[in-house]
Image (tube, rainbow, N blue to C red):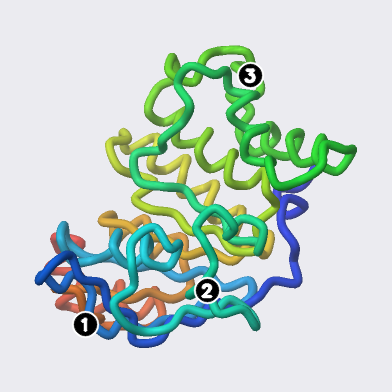
């Protein structure tokens, strides 16, 4: 079986975000957020609805304007890099809501993820790796994506991002709307990708999933970083346990 880790470049590059701010009109959604993701590191960003999590991720991808701050990936300043070119730099993105192409079959959706690559034996190996990671997608490769369940569509969205062989994968609420069993499956997948050396930045409301799949975590409240540290330490924090784990 081809290892999932072969879908990424193990050399990696660091993502460094400094004093990021996002505004919508006169409303400040994100204020002075700083974070970093080192090669092979998995970082989580948790918070309630409206905390600024998705705005942060979309700003990193250049999908919404950055009002202030800087975003660097390796030696590249991402300020002038269009969102469509992020994948060529090695940044994969799994958006909130999956956004699969419902009218195309599973395999065509996956192949669209490799649009920036040449079709060759390496690309075929990556496709085989995605099917190894998500066997159900291989079984349904000729089924329309719109006919898949929510969990299967989430697997497809992750697989599509992996087809570009990213060195860093950004995920926005991958557990949203899924059953507990499917959330567990997604968690197992993220842990496998993490253990295979892929850098991850995970935005989630599900704090338990985040703590179980990341090494480090930040808590976002009202657009600002309220807490940060090792995921194991934050999961034991009394305030975090009360507010985000219901304990």
Q: Are marks 1 and 3 in contact (CB under 8 Å)?
A: no
Q: Which residue is mark 1?
A: 226
Residue 141, picture quadrant: top right
Q: CA distance from mark 3 to mark 2?
A: 35 Å
Which residue is rendered at x = 65% and y = 64% of the image? 89
What's the distance in space between the residues labelled 1 and 3, CA to CA?
43 Å
Compared with residue 59, is residue 153 higher up or lower down, i.e. above or below? above
Q: Nearer the viewer, mark 3 or mark 2?
A: 2
* Residue 201 spot, x, y in % from top left: 47, 65
Residue displayed at 67% across by 37% down: 130
The picture places residue 202, in percent across and down from the top left corner, at 42, 61
Going by the image, does 188 lie left or right of 230? right
Mark toward the start of the polypeptide (1 vs 2): 2
Is residue 138 shown left or right of residue 99? right
Camera sees residue 1: no
Q: Which mark is residue 78?
A: 2
Q: Residue furthest left?
A: 26
Residue 141 disc label: 3
The CA distance from mark 1 to mark 2 is 25 Å
Asked which quadrant contains residue 99, the reply is top left
């Amino acid at each position: 079986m081809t290892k999932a880790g072969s879908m990424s470049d193990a050399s990696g590059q660091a993502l460094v975000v400094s004093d990021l701010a996002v505004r919508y009109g006169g409303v400040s959604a994100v204020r002075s957020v700083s974070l970093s993701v080192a090669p092979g590191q998995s970082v989580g960003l948790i918070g309630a609805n409206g905390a600024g999590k998705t705005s942060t991720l979309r700003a990193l991808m250049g999908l919404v304007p950055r009002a202030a701050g800087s975003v660097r990936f390796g030696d590249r300043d991402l300020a002038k890099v269009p969102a469509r070119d992020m994948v060529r730099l090695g940044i994969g993105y799994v958006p909130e809501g999956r956004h699969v192409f419902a009218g195309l079959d599973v395999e065509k959706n996956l192949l669209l993820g490799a649009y920036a690559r040449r079709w060759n034996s390496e690309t075929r190996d990556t496709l085989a790796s995605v099917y190894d990671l998500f066997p159900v997608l291989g079984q349904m490769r000729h089924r329309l994506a719109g006919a898949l369940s929510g969990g299967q569509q989430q697997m497809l969205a992750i697989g599509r991002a992996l087809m570009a062989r990213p060195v860093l994968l950004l995920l926005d609420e991958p557990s949203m709307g899924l059953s507990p069993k499917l959330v567990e499956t997604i968690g197992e997948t993220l842990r496998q990708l993490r253990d295979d050396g892929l850098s991850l930045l995970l935005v989630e409301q599900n704090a338990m999933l985040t703590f179980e799949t990341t090494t480090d975590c930040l808590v976002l409240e009202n657009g600002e970083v309220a807490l940060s540290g090792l995921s194991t330490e934050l999961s034991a924090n009394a305030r975090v346990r009360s507010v985000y784990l219901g304990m």
